[in-house]
Image (spheres, grey):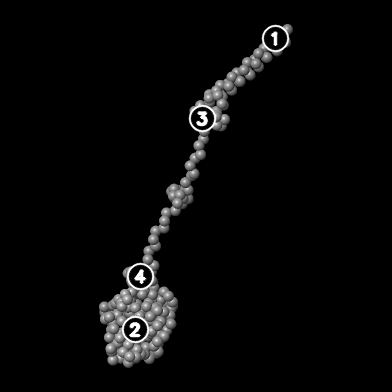
Amino acid sequence: MRGSVRLGLCAVVATGWLCAAASAQQSRYAEGGGYGGGLIEYLVTGQAGGGGRGWPQRSAAPQRVAAYSGELLPAEPEPLQALPPQQAYGVPQTDPGRIAREVGPEYRRQEVAFAGPQRPGTIVIDTAAKHLYLVQPGQRALRYGIGVGRPGFAWSGLKTVSRKAEWPDWTPPAEMLARRPDLPRHMAGGPENPLGARALYLGSSLYRIHGTNEPGTIGQSVSSGCIRMMNEDVVDLYDRVPVGTRVEVL
């Protein structure tokens, strides 16, 4: 008899526990609108349920962080700033516009009338007008535009072409280095060399007729006494005159 009573009590306790668990589970699903919350309820009702907790949204892509400073980097790189002007021959270009300046038509190579007394084959340099003449027969001359010595470096006289060089090296004389110690002591010939494509050396002086990599200076008084020409013009003159040619600088 006592054994039957114990067995019955255990059955009652077990039944009560199972009912309580089922009731709690139904209550939990009922909180979210009857669909159990979570993904199923979100798909049916558009709401996540579950006590008002929203369905997790995709978070924004994290920004890149600079490891060296911790600062946020922009999504796109900022445009690079313009680089400072290049330096030519080891010397800052104080007037970059000289290179880009348009050469006037009066400084373009052309054949013109020439009334001077010089014989054909003579080079005549008119420093005031910034013109070089190669005298031709029949009172004609080939005229070239030139750049000449700046104030304090102008000169005149008679010289002779003593040497010719293609793409000459440049070794600034001591006098120039004393004025400009920042200049290179030597520069090999080439497109970056200030003597340009050709050079005609005048006697034993420091002066030359030479090309330039700054064609915008033609028609200007900018040199230290040398006569500069556009590269295509000095090549043309170089091919026309031999060593020993007479040069008159007016």
Q: Give percent across and percent down for residue 248.
A: 31, 88
The quadrant of the rendering that contains the C terminus is bottom left
Q: Give percent across and percent down for residue 42.
A: 54, 31
Q: Could you tell me the amino acid type at mark 2?
A: Glu
Q: How far apart are marks 4 and 3 (CA)?
A: 70 Å
Secondary structure under tag 3 reads loop
Residue position marked by numbered label 3 in the rendering: 47
Q: Nearer the viewer, mark 2 or mark 4?
A: 2
Bin the neighbour count of mark 1 within 10 Å (Cα to Cα): few under 14, some 14-19, many 20 and up: few
Mark with earlier residue (2, 3):
3
For the question of whether residue 223 can be seen, the reply is no
Q: Give percent across and percent down for residue 44.
A: 55, 29
For the question of whether residue 62 can be seen, the reply is yes
Mark with earlier residue (4, 3):
3
Whether 20 is drawn above or below 91: the answer is above
Which numbered circle lies on residue 130?
none
Q: Give percent across and percent down for residue 117.
A: 28, 91
Bin the neighbour count of mark 3 within 10 Å (Cα to Cα): few under 14, some 14-19, many 20 and up: some
Which numbered circle lies on residue 5?
1
Q: Could you tell me the amino acid type at mark 1?
A: Val
Residue position marked by numbered label 4 in the rendering: 100
Q: How far apart are marks 2 and 3 (CA)?
A: 93 Å
Residue position marked by numbered label 2 in the rendering: 111
Q: Which residue lies furthest to the top in this view?
A: 1
Q: Nearer the viewer, mark 1 or mark 2?
A: 2
The residue that appears at 38% across and 69% down in the rendered structure is 87
Q: Could you tell me the amino acid type at mark 4?
A: Ala
Location of residue 20 (image quadrant): top right
Location of residue 179 (image quadrant): bottom left
Q: Could you tell me the amino acid type at mark 3?
A: Gln
Secondary structure under tag 4 reads helix
Secondary structure under tag 1 reads helix
